[in-house]
Amino acid sequence: MIKKYLSIILAVCMLATMAVFTGAVKTKAAETTVTFNFPDMNLGDTQNVTDPLTKDGVTITFSKAGGSTVPVYYENGTGIRVYKDNTIKVEAGKNITKVVFEFTQENGGFSANTGTYETPTWTGSASSVTFTKTEAKHHRIKSMAVTLSDEGGSTDPGTNPGTDPGTEPGNDTLAILEALYGLESGQTLEGTYTLTGVVTKVVTPFNTQFNNITVNMVCSGYDQYPVQCYRLEGDGADQLDVNDTITVTGKLKRYNNTYEFDQGCHLDSYVKGVPPQSDPLPTTTEEILKALYALEKGDYLKGTYTLTGKITEVVTEFSSEYNNVTVVMVCEGYDQYPVTCYRLKGEGADVIGVNDTITVTGSLKRYNDTYEFDQGCNLDSYTKGEAPATGGTEPTPTPTTTEEILKALYALEKGKALEGTYTLTGKVTEVVTEYSEEYQNVTVNMVCEGYDQYPVQCFRLAGDGADVIGVNDTITVTGTLKRYNDTYEFDKGCHLDSYTKAAAPGGDPTGDPTALTTPDEILNAAYALESGGNLGDTEYTLTGVITKINDAYSDRYKNITVTMVVNNITDKPIQCFRLAGDGADKIMPGDTITVKGKIKNYNGTVEFDQGCQLLSYTQSGQAVELPETPEEILAALYALEAGDALPGTYTLTGKITEIQTEFNPQYNNISVVIAVEGHDDQPVLCYRLEGQGADSLRVGDVIEVKGTLKNYNGTREFAAGCTILSINGQRPAPSTGDAVSAMVFAGVIVVALCAAFIARRKREF
């Protein structure tokens, strides 16, 4: 019996041994799961998610791809929102066998380029897998769990080069070009590439200020795939011309319908070719002007030129910060060929004006429908001309009385100013812009006694008392008087010489009412105020429900403006102007808030004054569905009533159709109007737009802007403080200050890490 059992055991052992050596028994490969929980990954609210996310050897890349909106992380819904035609690429050094999505909202229409996807799980075997959102309604993805296997069999999906911006075509020229031309607008090939080709066109001549040039080239045998080298840098870039052979290294992308090496590409080497056979360069004034006007949009004349002409218009006044001015001139006998001198520099640029004769040297180009000397042109000489005619042969006497000053001001044409400085005394009728603590100024309208038909705006009025003046106060102001469009005003920099406060309602100069305790008493007293009146220095507390957002929360100033209704008294709403405090960034319509502050009547609006505090808030529990796509955002913006704002911050991309206010070097901002592609009938003003590159914006540029959106008296706009994210598809380079800050921050991190390491070693020893 024992022998029988021993025989069985021996047989089993032999079989097991054979299985080990022949592979008949196979152990399961080790698996690990890497989980990306996006709310824990330090993504900011409304942040565009386009940079790769990497964890434990796995990389996930969200891409706009062929969509109209980039993937965005929202705290509302706690997840990354993926829109139609967006892609998600998952890559790893090991074999990916499973990807599990956790959705907070799933709306169907999701496909993978390999393996099998059944909501919410993908299974397969690949080192990379790309998911595409195929239907209009977006997904909200809270997390992704990626399972990796040590087992072999890892295969890349058989996609065609170029259909996925992550596909690397290797070093074969044809494969690189086909991959580049397979990109959709806005996509970039991963990695850097090197191509050799012949220059076919100099798109932008070498710029001595920025040391770069833009050229088009074609690789030998592939004329059907021209490549632009955008802002190409490197030794010899200043020598390049048509027919030269160049070798270039950089990132390759598709920008609209241009296939290009991106900004920052490098000229590795060049070989001079046969100089192009071309017509002689124009030399006479007539030849130069006719050649300039024969250019196509975006083209330059080869070489530098000098023209002499008379100034007909000062487009942009001289900037003391940048030491340049933009003017239009016409050469004698060629009035039909005006030439803009863009950002003209040189001795005398600060004093030239209309009718002066100037000689200018620089590069000539056609920018859209403007024929111009390009930025960097130089004022060689100038001769002062006669002052522009004022309409009479006799010089106009300087106005002295209030009546003369006002009539002379109202006789000005748009954009003109009275010579000299003037002083006027009048009563404030409106506070146009509240006093700014940051800039120490206020903008008000006033009328002089007996001249109500001639209101005067005091633009950015500064001086002692500017922070306390209000409606009905009497003020004396000195400054330059001008007509800005249809506004007659003291120009920026005007000074408040003196002021007299008006008596409060009822003749009580303190404005302090009798004690008010109940919400009804407070509201009744507030609504009894005349415009400009207030309830004194007493701070009142009221609780109400938010009915609308007047100005969205400002990250810069940490405040929000909302309107609330107290105790369901709907006929007496109260505005909470620039409300600050914990939770101000979270409150939404429908939430209940308690506010403390001073109360006044500002031009008919009863409000808690600036400086009011949010004491507490209770959220309604109802999720507010915010617009996301450009179509939804514009529809919501244009549905706003005057004075209302959309909650949250938004990003829109559009083409500049108008420069409403030129760049202001003092405040580093500009106001422009943009039109989103396909929505020309819904223009958006970018009011006091800030950011790198704001000083160089022109009509026709395509810009991406982020900020809060509102309806200001019928104008749909990004509110002041909106910022530039990109210009013509390029992220603006950080300023020197930003770079220094980054270096300092990096240095602090390194020091901290070193200190931690030393402390740890001390503990070990």
Image: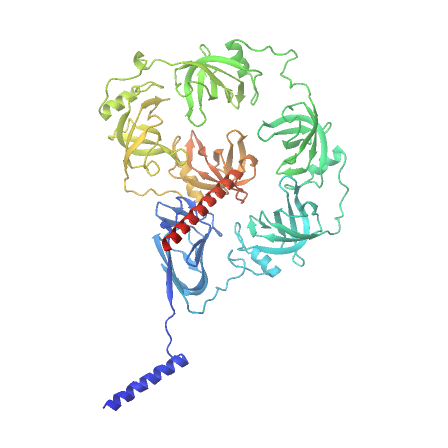
Q: Quadrant of the N terminus?
A: bottom left
Q: Is residue 85 visible?
A: no
Q: x%, y% of residue 655?
A: 53, 40
Can you say whether 379 is above or below 33 in the image? above
Vertical position of residue 379 compared to residue 132: above or below? above
Q: Can residue 605 be seen in this view?
A: yes
Q: Residue 633's quadrant in the figure?
A: top left
Q: Position of residue 44 (x, y in %)?
A: 40, 44
Query: What residue sits 27% from the left and 20% below the top?
Result: 525
- Quadrant of the rendered structure where residue 347 is? top right
Residue visible at 48% across and 64% down in the picture: 156
Give the color scheme: rainbow, by chain, secondary structure or one colour: rainbow
- Does 528 sit left or right of 346 as displayed? left
Say which quadrant the C terminus sits in.
bottom left
Write the residue at 35% across / 34% down. Answer: 549
Q: Which residue is drawn at 59% across and 60% down?
A: 171
Return the x and y of residue 308 as percentages of the image width and height: 72, 29
Count of numbered circles on the image: 0
Viewer-side residue, 115 vs 57: 57
Q: Residue furthest front?
A: 765
Toward the top, the furthest residue is 401
Snapshot quadrant of residue 629: top left
Left or right of 583? Residue 66 is right
Q: Is 535 displayed left or right of 469 in the figure? A: left
Residue 550 screen position, x and y as percent: 37, 32
Above or below 412: residue 140: below
